[in-house]
Image (tube, rainbow, N blue to C red):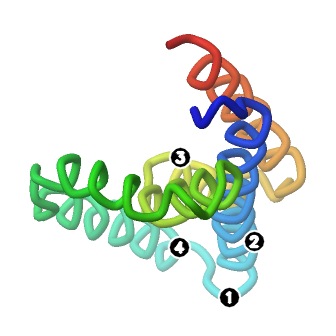
Amino acid sequence: TFRAPWRVFWGMTLGYLLLDGIAVYVGGMIPHMYRGVWLDRIVAAIFILFGLISLLIPVKAGEQVQGWFIKFQHWGAFTVSFLAIAVSEIGDRTQLGAAAWSAESGRPWAVLAGAMSALMLLNLITVWIR
C-alpha cells in the first residue's frame, strides 16, 4: 500500500464516492423520467446488460492490472488508488444496487450514505489487513 495507508484509503474512498454518487444521482432521476412498467423494464435491462458485460471481461485483467500498477506507481498512492477504483469498478453491483435503491426509495442521500459507509469500512479492512 505504498507505505501510505491513509492516502490509499482516501483515494479508494473518493473513487467509490465518484462512481456511487453518479449511480445514486442517475437512480434518483429515473423515476422522474419513467414511471410504472417502464421503470421496471429499464432497471431489469440495465442489470442484464451489466451482467453480460461482466461475463465478457477477460480473466487476464488481473494480470494486466499488476503491470499497470507498476507502471504508474510514481504517481503516488492517492492518485493510483483513486484511478484504480474509478476505472475498475465501473458498472459494479454496488453501483447498480445504489441506483436501484435510489430509484425505489426516493431518498438518494440516505442510499449514498449507506453505500459509502459500507465501502469505507471495506476500504479500512482492505488497506490495513495485509
Q: Quadrant of the N terminus?
A: top right
Whichever of callouts 1 and 3 sits on the residue coming sooner in the sequence is 1
Q: Is residue 124 left or right of residue 45?
A: right
Whichever of callouts 1 and 2 sits on the residue coming sooner in the sequence is 2
Give, as a three-letter code, the residue at label 2: Tyr
Q: Residue at x 70, y 22 (%)?
A: 124
As helix, strand or loop, the secondary structure at mark 1 comes to helix
Contact, mark 3 vs mark 2 (Cβ under 8 Å) = no
Residue at the far top in the pictured view: 129
Q: Is residue 99 left or right of residue 57?
A: right
Tag in front: 2 or 4 = 2
As helix, strand or loop, the secondary structure at mark 4 comes to helix
Badge number at residue 25:
2
Circle 4 residue: 39
Give, as a three-letter code, the residue at label 1: Met
Give, as a three-letter code, the residue at label 4: Leu
As helix, strand or loop, the secondary structure at mark 2 comes to helix
Give, as a three-letter code, the residue at label 3: Thr
Distance Cα–Cα, label 2 vs label 4: 15 Å
Q: Is residue 92 left or right of residue 28?
A: left
Quarter of the image for residue 118 reads top right
Q: Residue at x 38, y 53 (%)?
A: 70
Badge number at residue 33:
1
Tag in front: 3 or 4 = 3
Circle 3 residue: 94
Whichever of callouts 1 and 4 sits on the residue coming sooner in the sequence is 1
Quarter of the image for residue 19 reads bottom right
Whichever of callouts 3 and 2 sits on the residue coming sooner in the sequence is 2
Seen from the viewer's position, the closer of residues 10 and 25 is: 10
